[in-house]
Image: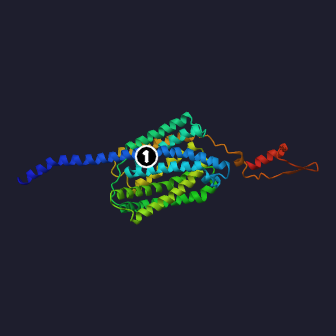
């Protein structure tokens, strides 16, 4: 007993020093990485928020001289300003990608609320989409909720290879989420879009959001592969890395297509917050399933993050309540009527041809309007 006791005492005396030094280093490293992710996510929000406005102006210019993107036109591809917006968005998304390397998705994604504020303010000045006082309150709520989520964000997992990410991506729970996401996207694309795409903003943004959650997960995997490669562990020869790359490229193309349609059809100040709320919701859910972000976190931290997210959603609702209906151009209002139609009306045994500038008989005018706008 006496020979063991000194060893135990020595070990007990040395333990506090070892225990305190290691967590301090780990905590400091985590804080530094989270701070880097925070700065990059803020920069990303500024670029992406600006890109919404630049692309919107480009879409409007393209729509003035040809078919609009909301009706299937692709004339915006020839509009230089739209490409400026695309480059701005790419820069923002690249900053977002690097942010995912340093910080967990639960921290980075909610900071997208900054893009809402940027786009709403710029739309107020450049697109004449007025931001009312209640709209400002909605923006403040979005920011406050995001800050609350950031303060209670969990630490990121330490992964040593892309194979570990692949194992997380192929676990049954996440595969079920992927299957459900694809099913929802197909229903929205094949059934809902032809019927409700022009009138219900949730159709286009729903497609962008559910697909976007898969984009973030694949981009997170690519970011981990890049980080490990730069540290000396080459991940570019692993087939998993290229699968994640193909998934991310495919999802990004789908997102851009339907986001363009949403921007061209609906008010930008409404598209941004609703897209943010839906996109963040699905991304946090996907990250929680795949990376198990909240595993081991205290109930108070989870509850605080949930309150922050509810605050963000409340801000979105406030912004949505301030929506000003878009005024369609005259050409869009009468797009379903042929401009070459002439009317032959028989009255008192005589035939009268209505010209473009002629006034219709009051009774006939009433019937025409009733039939067309019924």
Residue 315 against residue 374 in the figure, above or below: above
Picture colour scheme: rainbow
How many circles with numbers are drawn on the protein? 1
- The answer to which of 99 and 208 lies nearer the viewer is 99
- Which residue: 17% across, 49% down? 15
Which quarter shows the N terminus?
bottom left
Coordinates of residue 198 in the picture (x, y in percent): 63, 51
Coordinates of residue 278 in the picture (x, y in percent): 50, 49
Coordinates of residue 54 in the picture (x, y in percent): 56, 45
User: Looking at this rendering, what residue extends furthest in the left direction?
Assistant: 2
Residue 322 visible in this rendered orientation of the protein: no
Q: Mark 1 Cα within 10 Å, few/some/many (few <14, many 20+)?
A: many
Coordinates of residue 293 in the picture (x, y in percent): 37, 52
- The answer to which of 47 and 198 lies nearer the viewer is 47
Residue tagged 1: 41
Residue 100 visible in this rendered orientation of the protein: yes
User: Looking at this rendering, what residue extends furthest in the top direction?
Assistant: 133
User: Looking at this rendering, what residue extends furthest in the right direction?
Assistant: 349
**Dot 1: element:** helix
Residue 162 against residue 283 in the figure, above or below: below
| Horizontal side of residue 127 vs 49, given as left or right | right
- Which residue: 80% across, 45% down? 366
- Which residue: 6% across, 54% down? 3
| Horizontal side of residue 143 vs 189, given as left or right | left
| Horizontal side of residue 352 vs 43, given as left or right | right
């Amino acid at each position: 007993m006496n020979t063991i006791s000194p060893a135990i005492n020595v070990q007990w005396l040395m333990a506090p020093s070892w225990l305190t030094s290691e967590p301090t280093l780990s905590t400091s490293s985590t804080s530094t990485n989270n701070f880097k992710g925070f700065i990059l996510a803020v920069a990303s929000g500024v670029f992406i928020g600006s890109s919404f406005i630049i692309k919107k102006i480009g879409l409007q210019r393209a729509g003035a001289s040809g078919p609009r993107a909301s009706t299937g036109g692709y004339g915006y591809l020839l509009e230089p300003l739209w490409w400026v917006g695309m480059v701005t968005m790419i820069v923002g998304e690249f900053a977002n990608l690097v942010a995912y390397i340093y910080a967990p998705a639960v921290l980075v994604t909610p900071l997208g609320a900054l893009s809402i504020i940027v786009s709403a303010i710029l739309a107020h000045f450049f697109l004449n989409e007025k931001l009312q006082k209640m709209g400002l309150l909605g923006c403040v709520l979005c920011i406050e909720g995001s800050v609350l989520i950031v303060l209670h964000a969990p630490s990121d997992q330490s992964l040593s290879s892309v194979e570990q990410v692949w194992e997380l991506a192929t676990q049954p729970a996440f595969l079920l989420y992927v299957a459900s996401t694809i099913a929802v996207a197909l229903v929205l694309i094949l059934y809902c879009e032809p019927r409700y795409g022009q009138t219900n903003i949730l159709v286009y943004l729903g497609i962008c959001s559910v697909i976007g959650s898969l984009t973030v997960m694949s981009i997170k995997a690519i970011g981990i592969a890049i980080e490990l490669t730069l540290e000396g562990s080459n991940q570019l020869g692993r087939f998993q890395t290229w699968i994640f790359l193909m998934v991310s490229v495919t999802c990004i193309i789908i997102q851009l297509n339907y986001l363009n349609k949403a921007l061209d059809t609906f008010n930008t100040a409404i598209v941004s917050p609703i897209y943010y709320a839906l996109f963040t919701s699905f991304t946090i859910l996907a990250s929680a399933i795949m990376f198990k972000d909240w595993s081991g976190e205290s109930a108070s931290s989870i509850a605080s993050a949930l309150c922050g997210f509810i605050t963000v959603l409340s801000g979105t609702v406030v912004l949505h309540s301030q929506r000003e209906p878009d005024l369609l151009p005259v050409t869009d209002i009468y797009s379903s009527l042929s401009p070459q139609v002439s009317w032959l009306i028989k009255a008192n045994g005589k035939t009268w041809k209505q010209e473009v500038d002629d006034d219709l008989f009051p009774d006939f005018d009433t019937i025409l309007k009733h039939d067309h706008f019924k």
